[in-house]
Image: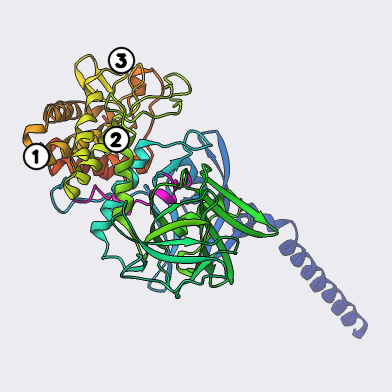
Amino acid sequence: MARLNLKLLLLLLIAIVSFTLITYTFNCGHPVSSHPSFIQRLEEPSLTESRGKIYEELDCSINGMYHISCRKEGREVFIPFSFLEKYYEVYGKLTKSKGHEQFEWSHSYSKVFKPTTPYNASGMFMYFSNYNVEVRDRVKCISATEGVPVSTQWEASGYYYPVQVAQYGLSHYSKNLSEPPPKRKVLEDGNTFTAKWQVPKGAYIRRNYDSAKLTHVLEFNSRDSAGISLRLKQGTDLVLSFDLRFLSMNGSLTLFLEDRDRSQTFPVSFTCSSVLVEAHNASGSYSTIYGMGNCQSWNRLTRDLHIDLVKGHVLSGRGKKLSRTKLRVHHLLLKGNGQLDNLTLASSNHMDMFYSSADWLVVHQDSSGGWPIGVKRKIASGRADLDPGWYSAMGQGQAMSLLMRAFYRSGKPHYLEAALKGMQPFSKSSTEGGVRAYFMNQYPWYEEYPTVPPSFVLNGFIYSLIGLYDVVSLAPPNQVGDAQLLFDQGMHSLKKLLPLFDTGSGTVYDLRHFTLGLAPNIARWDYHSTHINQLLLLSTIDSDPILTNVAERWISYMSGKRAAHN
């Protein structure tokens, strides 16, 4: 009986172990595939966690042309901004706001300056107080013989571009009105103000009355010495003005600028030479030299020494990273035999720079009233080129705006005469060397680029209208000539043609797509905002609502809005 019970117990134990093994195998083996949550985990792609949120990597196909890596979070898909920025030409950056990082997105990089007062022909010119023409990369330097910018925009060797000359003068005129009065110190005038010059043995200085200038001047002769020097006190004023003439051809005036951070000294020289600008490197010591041309008659120079130094650095390949606030004039050195007067150091001298432009325009106006542009202009990939000697309605208009302000401020009639003469090309066809074209043989248009067929550039046309308006506003009524008629005809054309420049999301620069059958020439945002700023200015002159209505619609395009579709 005991043996039977033992056998029964053994069989029971075997049965329990067998059942346990079968159950374990069933739960941990093949039947796992029927577990729904496990199936989902196997089938899902790999997930990534970022700041507590789960997203998955996703391949995005953009119009079947581009394949980029995107991210999916729930039902939302995120496309990299680096792609959107280039694809849609939008702009964005990470910024800090109240201690938190945020992303700022914008459709436009440019600004609109809404006028707060009616346009005044004797006041600031638009928003040109913000312009720094001489800083532009396409300005090679400010000529020491002419006192105006030398452009490299269409020719690397440099040339005088009337548009740039006028803009240089208008910007300084506007800065003179918008900025506080400059700090100014007369260092030497041969009479009231006399400096403590360091005169080496054999050299001399003396102060004599000059019958040509009708004033006392400083006469100097360095002879065989290293030069006559003047040590200057510390300060950040870098605009130097002086009257100078040399009685010998080997004379020079050199300013030594010191970088206070790097303890480096940079010489900037003005010499009796026809060279425009040179940069020299002697054993790692760089110098910049500007030629003054014939020095044997009196020259009036006003120089922004920071700009002069930067242009020399660029020419020598050192770039233009020179902080204005860290520079000072250390000392001045005179060499040769000559005369000096009105040596002045100031924080700015905008009116001297303004009159340099006005005087250049008077001297270089031709017998037809134009300011010819001496380089070839290639337009529309060679479809409508302009040979050297062409006029620009924009150049004529901005020159007139500047000259009328010079006449208003000085009362000198030669500025008025040049402005009035500048209207002559407006009545002459582009095909005959003028700037006048017609749209559909009906609407007169003053061409920035007088091509054949016409190109109808918008911003240049409006600048020419502003120039005509300035003549109407500031010239004596009996001398206005055709200015009012030309302005009225132009305003009528502008109002009729404005819709042609509207793309529904921006503007076009010109109408070459009408006249040349090319793709539209879409205006960059800075030109688009210029169109708006010009219309807003004209709206303070002309109350026709089309000007403000169009301007406001074009402003909305800058924040991404578009015209409604059908």
Magenta region, residue range: 123-145
Nearer to me, 339 or 162: 339
- In the picture provided, is 121 more to the left or to the right than 331? left
Amino acid type at mark 1: Ser
Horizontally, residue 32 falls left or right of residue 421, namely right
Q: Which residue is mark 3?
A: 432
Return the residue at label 1.
Answer: 543
Q: Is residue 335 above or below residue 521?
A: below
The tag on residue 459 is: 2
The earlier-in-sequence mark between 2 and 1 is 2
Q: Nearer the viewer, mark 2 or mark 1?
A: 2
Category of crowding for the residue at label 1, using alpha-carbon neighbours closer than 10 angstroms: few (below 14), some (14–19), many (at least 20): few
Going from the N terminus, do you reach mark 1 or mark 3 first?
A: 3
Q: Position of residue 536 (x, y in %)?
A: 19, 44
Residue 554, above or below 247: above
> In front here: 425 or 186?
186
Residue at 25% x, 44% y: name it: 533
SS label for mark 3: helix
**Residue at coordinates 41% horizontally, 72% vertically from top-left?**
195
Picture coordinates of residue 118, whole percent (x, y)? 13, 48
Q: CA distance from mark 2 to mark 3?
A: 23 Å
